[in-house]
Image (cartoon, rainbow, N blue to C red):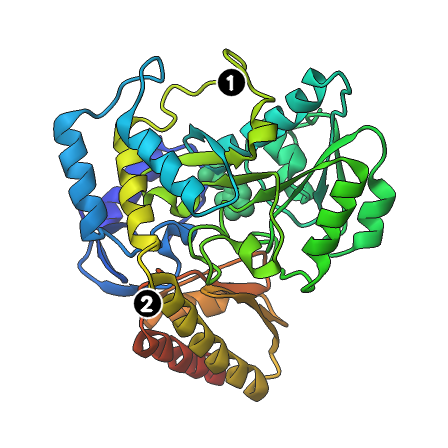
Amino acid sequence: METRDIKKLNDQFIINTYGERKLALVRGEGTNLWDADGNEYLDMFAGIAVTNLGHCHPAVTEAVCEQARKLVHVSNLYYIEPQVQLAELLSKHSFAARWFFCNGGAEANEAAIKIARRYWAQKGTPKPVIIAAEQSFHGRTMATIAATGQPKYHQGFEPLFPGVQHVPFNDIDALGNAVDADVGAVLLEPIQGEGGVNVPDEDYLGKVRGLCDEKQVLLMFDEVQTGLGRTGKLFAYEHYGVTPDVMTLAKGLGNGVPIGAMGCTEEVASGFDVGSHACTFGGNPLSAAAALATMNVLVTPGFIEDAARVGAHFFAGLNQLAGKYDGICAVRGKGLMVGIEMKEPVAPLVQKLLEAGIICGSAGPKVLRFLPALIITSAEVDEVVSKLDAALGER
Ligand SMILES: *Cc1c(COP(=O)(O)O)cnc(C)c1O
């Protein structure tokens, strides 16, 4: 099918939650994508921080094909070999002792919210309130839109799930004032993604950890976007010398095969017992095999360090542009999670870059966003910087 045929069927049969799109992408390899009309693009968005190893990474493709020939699905009524191997590998490389698997980020955060509530209920000291940050994004289910600190995601869905309070991100005093005896958990993205690529002060998360310890509150990091190498470490919390009690993962976990995970300490894991939570597809053989193969590449010595180096090179180039153009207010992010706040709405810029063969995105109206695969090269980011320079120069 050509793009116009695909668009025609979409407009007739798909519920219009995504609006008009420019492209129908039909093939990918590494950092390249091709549309239905045969045009090639450099992918600087990786399916929203999902295909962190690049499109159709051979190790993941091989693992998926092999698993698909052997066993695609059995339920969690049975032990699942690749799922337990994945959990062991994730634990080896993180603070978390135990894992619950599901299908995506919102479900992982639902599991986190549920285990926090149940953990305190089980202890006989119910503390149902969860504190989250303004400008956060935690997903689109009813509990996770309530946790999401952006009113635009709430409109028309009220009444919202109760028991969530919001405080400004990166403001330890506001958090301190909000924590009372009803608060059982604090849920934060270590670096906010959809809310504008907001990086906290170096000492903020450490102070949050201290406060949570003092007040006996669980600290839960939503690493759905920041995890799996995106910020130049396997998990973003590693930058800050802070470990949470609970962490959620999804986007990059299966390199495009849907899977989410909630990991926690042994202590918090006791909040769930037999029958208290479940997920039909969660960590099924196919998705777990994809995630296991993905993790094995991510933890290869040097892999994430190389990505961090390319990220630093990219930031250097972007900061040079920031010195040259008044329209750039700030360049923010870490590793290969990049946001450029502009004075003007960025939609026309995204379009210009697309016309120059570069796929990128935005985080809100005025933040241009790049989330390339971690295999992106210095030469490729140089190309992006020079095309962005040209696009800004034309304005
Ligand atoms: C994308 C995202 C989610 C939601 O993930 P889904 O898989 O779309 O449900 C949750 N939290 C963060 C930080 C995200 O970036």
Residue behind label 1 places its C-beta within 8 angstroms of ligand 1 = no
Q: Is residue 251 left or right of residue 113?
A: left
Q: Residue at x 52, y 44 (%)?
A: 95
Q: Which residue is mark 1?
A: 277
Front residue of this view, candidates 241 and 200: 241
In this orientation, does residue 210 appear? yes
User: Secondary structure under badge 1?
Assistant: loop
Q: Residue at x 65, y 30 (%)?
A: 156
Q: Earlier in the sequence, mark 1 or mark 2?
A: 1
Q: Amino acid at mark 2?
A: Ile
Seen in the picture, residue 44 relative to 177 is either above or below; the reply is: below
**Mark 1 vs mark 2: in front:** 1
In this orientation, does residue 17 appear? no
Q: Position of residue 2 (x, y in %)?
A: 19, 49
Front residue of this view, candidates 1 and 215: 215
Q: Residue at x 49, y 60 (%)?
A: 231
Q: Which residue is mark 2?
A: 376
**CA–CA distance in space, label 1 to label 2:** 39 Å
- Residue 118: assigned label: none
Q: Quadrant of the N terminus?
A: top left
Q: Picture quarter containing residue 245?
A: top right
